[in-house]
Image (tube, rainbow, N blue to C red):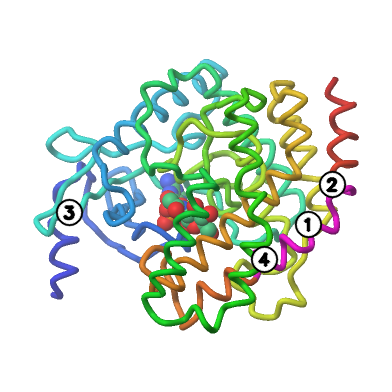
Amino acid sequence: MSGEELIRREVIENFTFPGKLVEEILYGSGHINDTFRLAFETEQGRKRYILQRMNKSIFHKPVELMENIVGVTSWLRKKILANGGDADRETLNIVLARDGRPYYLDSAGDYWRAYLFIEGASCYDKVEKREDFYQSAVAFGHFQGLLADYPAKTLHETIMNFHNTASRLDDFKAAVLRDTCGYAGDVQREIRFVLEREHLAYVLGEMQAEKKLPLRVTHNDTKLNNIMIDDKTGKAICVIDLDTVMPGLAVNDFGDSIRFGASTGDEDERDLAKVSCDMELFELYTKGFVEGCAGSLTDEELDMLPIGAMVMTYECGMRFLADHLDGDVYFKTHREGHNLDRCRTQFKLVADMEKKLSAMNAIVDKYRQRER
Ligand code: ADP
Ligand code: GN1
Ligand code: MG
């Protein structure tokens, strides 16, 4: 057994899983944590679970992070049950460690957590059925609604300045100056792209400071593959990946979904001719998100949805480029230049959104009228 397998044995023995372990596979396509799907044979049949090693170079306070997730999932569970829903499938459910904690610290110094596996539902890395994208919008909007009265002050900031785009711009500039791998000379065009659009880094933060955009409890990582869609009904049943639930801006949650799901190409597509913002998908998501938020979005928030899409895409591209310059230390990569490819798709999308801004505004106006 390798050292890695031995550690996993230790970890699995220290969670309250039932029965005999019969399957253990590396799972999912997240960029951050190491995720495994486990199956156990029990007297009641086969039971599956998700086991995750939390990324300690990204999450510096795993205990506080799990405190957030315990708080948010138990809050959601209560609301789902009160609405007559199935709380085992409509929110993440934590499996406790044998010592009663919601995590286990292994002998190598890594923190792990486990969830019930949500059966009969799937995550998608790309929109396969358009309806799924609409469903995900309703679910992310609704998620925000369920957490609208959550005591935001009790939430720990899991990553400081996570969607503070101005601070991301500072980090980016520092990465360019460090030029750890000596790549900066080769990516001058991409660096210029960022510097020519610095205004995008400030616009939302300024509105927030002027109280024109309210802080809400938001998800902050609203990728399509962070939502589970029921295989039978086609409804989005569960919002997952709750690591970044923190006070944030609704327009950022909207924007991150558009960045990932409304693109005609994959996030790491090399052929940039395939990458653009699909306006039909933009419209579907807008309709679903506005409906899912059920009248709670202010006029200013509605006004800024298209800019939110542009800012989140700009920010993400800048994060990918900074990570490329730093030598791929943050996002998982699977090939050389992976983060640079990702950065280029994001900037192609930003440029396309710039051309489509007035069309996006018109779409938002259409659904604003219906809401009011
Ligand atoms: P990361 O932060 O690395 O993105 P996620 O928490 O999003 O990690 O998990 C990675 C993938 O694992 C998800 O995209 C999803 O496919 C799967 N997954 C996570 N939690 C569950 C769950 N409770 N039930 C079923 N699949 C899950
Ligand atoms: C990461 O964890 P995952 O893969 O859902 C990242 C997001 C980025 C995204 C880009 C904690 O999301 O912020 O937008 O990659 N999560 C964290 O695909 O940094
Ligand atoms: Mg994820």
Q: Is residue 339 magenta?
A: no
Q: Image point 36% across, 40% down: which residue?
A: 158
Residue bearing mark 2: 360
Pinpoint residue 306: horizontal percent, then vertical percent: 76, 44
- Badge 2 local density, few (<14 within 10 Å), some, or many (20+)? many
Residue 43 vertical placement versus 216 (above, below): below
- Pick whichever of labels 3 and 2 is earlier in the sequence: 3
The three-letter amino acid code for the residue at tag 1 is: Met
- Badge 3 local density, few (<14 within 10 Å), some, or many (20+)? many
How far, Cα to Cα, is label 2 from label 4? 18 Å
Residue bearing mark 1: 353
How far, Cα to Cα, is label 2 from label 1? 8 Å
Residue bearing mark 3: 11
Q: Please identify the quarter of the rendering in which residue 108 is found.
A: bottom left
- Badge 1 local density, few (<14 within 10 Å), some, or many (20+)? many
- Foreground disc of the pair 3, 2: 2
User: Residue 278 or 116: which is nearer the viewer?
Assistant: 278
- Pick whichever of labels 3 and 4 is earlier in the sequence: 3
- Pick whichever of labels 3 and 1 is earlier in the sequence: 3
The three-letter amino acid code for the residue at tag 2 is: Met
The three-letter amino acid code for the residue at tag 3 is: Val
- Pick whichever of labels 1 and 4 is earlier in the sequence: 4
Residue bearing mark 4: 347
Find the magenta span and give its range: 345-359
- Pick whichever of labels 2 and 4 is earlier in the sequence: 4
